Image: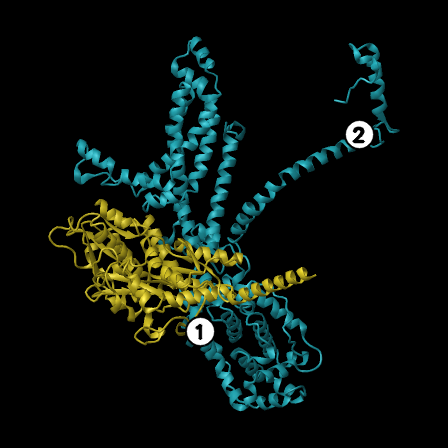
Chain colours: A yellow, B cyan
Amino acid sequence: MKLNKILLASSALTVAGGLAFAASHAEMANSMTLVSWGGAYQKSQIKAYSEPYMEMHPEVSISWDESSNEAVAKLRAMNEAGNITWDLVDVTAGDAIRLCDEGLAMEFDPNELLADGDDGSSAEDDFGDLLVSDCFIPQIVYSTTFGYRTDLVGDTPPADVCAVFDLETYPGKRSLEKRPINNMEWALLCDGVAKDDIYDVLETDEGQQQALDKLGTIKDQVVWWSAGADTPQLLADGEIVMGSTYNGRLFSLIEEQDQPVAMLWDGQVYDLDGWIIPEGLPEDRLARVKDFVRFATDTQRLADQAAYISYGPARKSSAPLVGKHAELGIDMAPHMPTDPANSGNTFLQNYSWWADYRDDIDAKFQAWLAQ
Amino acid sequence: MSELKSTGPQTMDAPTPEDALHEAATLRGRDQTDASGRLVTADGKSLKSSLKRALRMQKLRALMLIAPLLIFVLVTFIAPIGSMLFRSVENEIVANTLPMTTAALKDWDGTTGDLPDEQVYQNLFFDLFIAAEAKEHTKLGSRLNYELTGVSSLFRQSGRRLDDLGEVYQDPLEDLNDAWKDGATWYDLMSGSGAGDTDLVDDQRRRYNALTQSTDRRDIGFVPSQAISQMLPRTARAYTAWATFTVYADEDVVAEEDPWEAVHAALALDLMADGTAAKIAAYSGPRADLLQEAATLEFPAADFKTGFGEIDEDWLAHVTWETIKTYSPKYTNGYFLNAVDLQKTADGFEPRPENQRIYITLFQRTLFMSLVITFSCIMLGYPVAWLLANLPARTANLLMILVLLPFWTSLLVRTSAWKVMLQQQGVINDVLVWLGLVADDGRLVMINNQFGTIVAMTHILLPFMILPMYSVMQTINPTYLRAAKSLGATNWTAFWRVYFPQSVPGIGAGSILVFILSIGYYITPEIVGGTKGVFISNRIAYHISSSLNWGLAAALGTILFLVVLLLYWAYDKIVGIDNVKLG
């Protein structure tokens, strides 16, 4: 009898303890799947965000999925299957807008979800214009810009983005991305269209034709790339004189791999990269993600990331905290696309405009390429 | 054969004639005939039917044995492909998101150049309001943006500003009497008394489920009275739609929540309608006093057309409405038309503008280059397969490993290796320059064009050609060749007249494999194809993963699939599929 009672009591205790344990942890899931681009960029996120977070919360396990490239399509498929396996997804702002339109990304109130800046400004003010969508949590500012071979451009290194269209002074191949975004803008800019009028001109059929005609003047000399690694490889092999790619890729080519390549910051096009939270997460996972995202996008963490990769932090309050490269020990500020010395002549990609026109212009661009 | 078995003890030694008699007797006992002379079995059933039953059992057992595989293939292969291909005609989103608008548009004649009338704009307001609350309107915007540039932002921006259109009616009501700010007032008023209009509730549930692609069947805890729904039809509909949404999407209680601006607008429209005033004066249900008070209000005239025009002038553009009307039906051939460089118009279709035609070119290029690749594989693979089949085993095995080696290397590595080989500063050009065959400033362009794609893909697909050829050639008896020669044939004649015809089944099998694989190839053309060496599959991939135009991707995929089937059929007619051997 006695033994039975003890057994009964202890098992009741165990059950009660178990329930209490479950209750205290029901609010936050202990594992997260983050999606990013892989490579040096994902490494910078691991170093700056997830490792410090896991130190603070040893019970949390974080796994990474390198699927940002196909994130939009995969999220749509997951949503249709009713099984969202991702908790936080790193996408470009353009993709975030599309995911938001498709109802695949969660809308949020920036001041509620995100931490205030270290300088006391509210999250909304701190991120400012970079909150381009109701679903998009900005993380970095990067730019698509040109790099050139210092040994192939003669005595007059290019200082103007229109050097790309100048085959006489800079003969040789150049690489451009195999899509209309950015290329159309550069073409019009170098065809004498004022910067403020570019999108007005590009809205018309004649404007689109004008841009394609300008690109047509160098079409024979262009290698079209589709992966960010293409241009650095082509530059390193000496296949091209100059080419467009993401500024971080050029930074690692120049500073880490020591190739005879230099940056052409003129006419760089800013683009944003950041997080979206998939729509329809269960509550416990959502709570964990919110906690993580609040931490990972605070002023210090965004500044920390810049120690690993040359992309500018999206918060204004992070800029003064940007320090030296974690391994090379060089000052990172001059390598940021947002540094005053580099941002004399820049664009911010016009997301809402491209959301409307990309299908139409892409069809024309691809047809033009195939001719 | 029937069971012939000896029955007697005589079988201890060799069979005797007596045994045969015994057996004959046994057989006679089994195979009997019935009255009509049909063969029957021992239990009296006809032989034919019992044989059938036995066979059926056998077939069933066989089916059950393959059932796991069959179900697996159906569930994981056929069904997903079928559902993907189905997207090429599916177009329910327009009617699901704007059900009242598309219904009203049926009567609109787009050819006269007039804009739709006010009623269509009113329907659009109510449709779009629910859609915007459910965040479904932007999906429709991206869907229609594939057909008409600018619709995406038209819907996105309009969704944000719909409240303004409704507030015009909400403010006077709430200024008149604070009771209109209270959700309970509305609930009492709309529930009314007497019989409930359950049809309306069912309608709105169906509409909600269609809009959000859900299957919610819960009770919403509200039914409008029939009296109300006859007197204030718009209000009853809008309120029920809101109530459904409140319960299903927000998980709230209807009586405790304030309705949307759209419900206020609906009430104002009802109050302004002819004859409503008299009905309200005679009405005596709950909160009739409020209604009678509101009936005296002077609302601003209903002009949603101008309202939408102020939100975005594109709502006053004829082409916007034409596009919505053209894509109203639940099924569309629009994707297929796009896939062959046509575009759907209000009455039929027309060719796309010249500067947007791309798919026909890509289909032709895909077919042409796949044929070239198949042919190159035959030319390169045949001698190798012949060597493999005719060399001594040791050397052949070594060669075989060389053939198989590429199989064990990553596709990306192989493709990138070709990049290193073929580029202008690459290995081949360097060697040619070193040999003095080409000038340093005249290096050959061998990559990022069709040549690069053909070379890389031929290399990658070569094993698929060699292996079937090899297995067929192995079965060709070498004595035939010797016999031919001993009968006076030259080497060439012996090969061409004797050996080659026997190896044709291998060529056929290899060609089908290589051709079908290359027609759907994607990675290699993307990497080494430049602009002129890409295939149709690259566009399919673009529409699947980047532009999200899955309908068009499905249409392109379906066409590609049909082309392959057609070619297979032609191949069967010309060569005969029986002549194909995989080993």
Q: Secondary structure at mark 2?
A: helix
Where is mark 1, residue-wise?
A: B160
Percent coordinates x, y for residue A90 in the rendering: 39, 60
Quadrant in the rendering for residue B437: top left
Front-most of A333 and B375?
Answer: A333
Q: Tag 1: residue type?
A: Arg
Percent coordinates x, y for residue A61 in the rendering: 44, 58
Quadrant in the rendering for residue B48: top right
Q: Measured along the vertical axis of the image, is residue B229 above or below residue B324?
A: below
A268 vs B53, left or right, is: left
Q: Tag 2: residue type?
A: Leu
- Badges 2 and 1, same chain: yes
Where is mark 2, residue-wise?
A: B47
Q: Secondary structure at mark 1?
A: helix
Q: Earlier in the sequence, mark 2 or mark 1?
A: 2
Percent coordinates x, y for residue B567 in the rendering: 48, 37
Percent coordinates x, y for residue A104 in the rendering: 46, 62
Alpha carbon distance from label 2 to label 1: 78 Å
